Image (tube, helix red, strand yellow):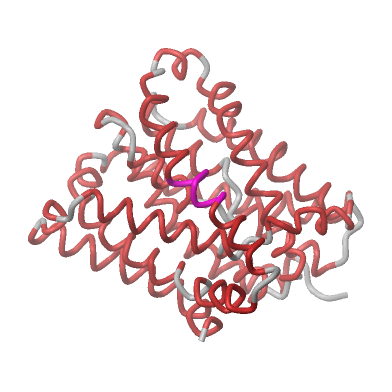
Amino acid sequence: MRNIIERHQVWAYLIAVVVGLFLGWKTSPGEVVPDYLIWALLGVMLYATFTQTPVTHLSDVFRDRRFVGALLTGNFLVMPTITALLILTLPDNGALKLGVLLVLLMPCTDWFITFTHLGKGDSTQAIAATPVLLIAQLALLPIYLWLFLGNQFNVNLELGGHLLPAFVGLIIVPLVLAFLTEKWAEDYRKATRFIRLMGLMPAPLLTVVLFIISMRQVSQIDSAGPLIWPLMILFPAYLLAAALVGKALRRVFRLPVATGRTVIFSLGTRNSFVVLPLALSMPEAWAAAVVVIVVQSLVELFGMMLYLRWVPSRLLPNT
């Protein structure tokens, strides 16, 4: 069942966004959806996702030091540098730049595994790498925002009053609960079955969340129209750079072909659903950041369709 859900999740997300935008544009039903419903769905979705991340086995991934070195170098050194250069091409809009930074600085920890598997990478390594990616990005994101936004970030310190509660309530709390659930599962079979059941939930929940958010954000997307067009160049440029950087890192760290593909899919996929609640918690002046994240998700989904054909057949074929 889980394999079927993961195989078709991309199309479910696309349909949810398109239908949500259409309904929101035609009838504006998104205004009647209560905020607490979105927060509840996000909280459960993140908890379910984190239970699939082997946080209790964090040390396992460090056995392959070259893989970890390539993964950390690419995700937290090279790609942030490229992201910093890309935002220089954007209009002088704080919300736009913040949205791009939020989504491009956070490596994916969920469908990255699925795409790695479908793209003939090493899905076992991908699973083992997720807790490292998750913990590193949560620790480094505030530093990156301070470095890349500089005085603009300091001037808008009111964001902290909105981001901090969302960060604690929707990321830290689900992460701690997932860790306790995994520890519980080590001793009880029923808990193991519960974790397997939770593994079925992230994709359907994310589909519902994307549908609701698309309905609610139609007006923002319409008003931010001129700002969206530069993103249609920036996000594909990021995907192209991620693929080329991944190929280069595979040579530098002398990785097997399958492992190199894993690095490429890690660099190309971003944690949009994790930063989405952070963006939703911001003041109205920063609402464009939500639009940026939704647009990036759509571009990434189409990009991954190309990755699945290009990476294993042309970029890193079997030798």
In the image, which residues are magenta?
170-176
**Quarter of the image that includes the C terminus:** bottom right
Left or right of 261? Residue 170 is left
Q: Residue reaching furthest front?
A: 187
Instruction: Name the foreground residue: 108 vs 15.
Output: 108
Report x, y in % for residue 17.
31, 63
Q: Residue at point 43% right, 46% down? A: 170
Report x, y in % for residue 208.
32, 66
Q: Which is the main secondary structure of the residues drawn in magenta?
A: helix
Residue 157 position by quadrant:
top left
Q: Residue at point 51% right, 36% down? A: 101
Report x, y in % for residue 200.
48, 76
Q: Is residue 284 above or below residue 114?
A: above
Left or right of 303? Residue 43 is left
87 within the magenta span: no
Residue 52 position by quadrant:
bottom right
Q: Is residue 135 above or below residue 111?
A: above
Q: Residue reaching furthest left?
A: 27
Instruction: Name the foreground residue: 48 vs 182.
Output: 182
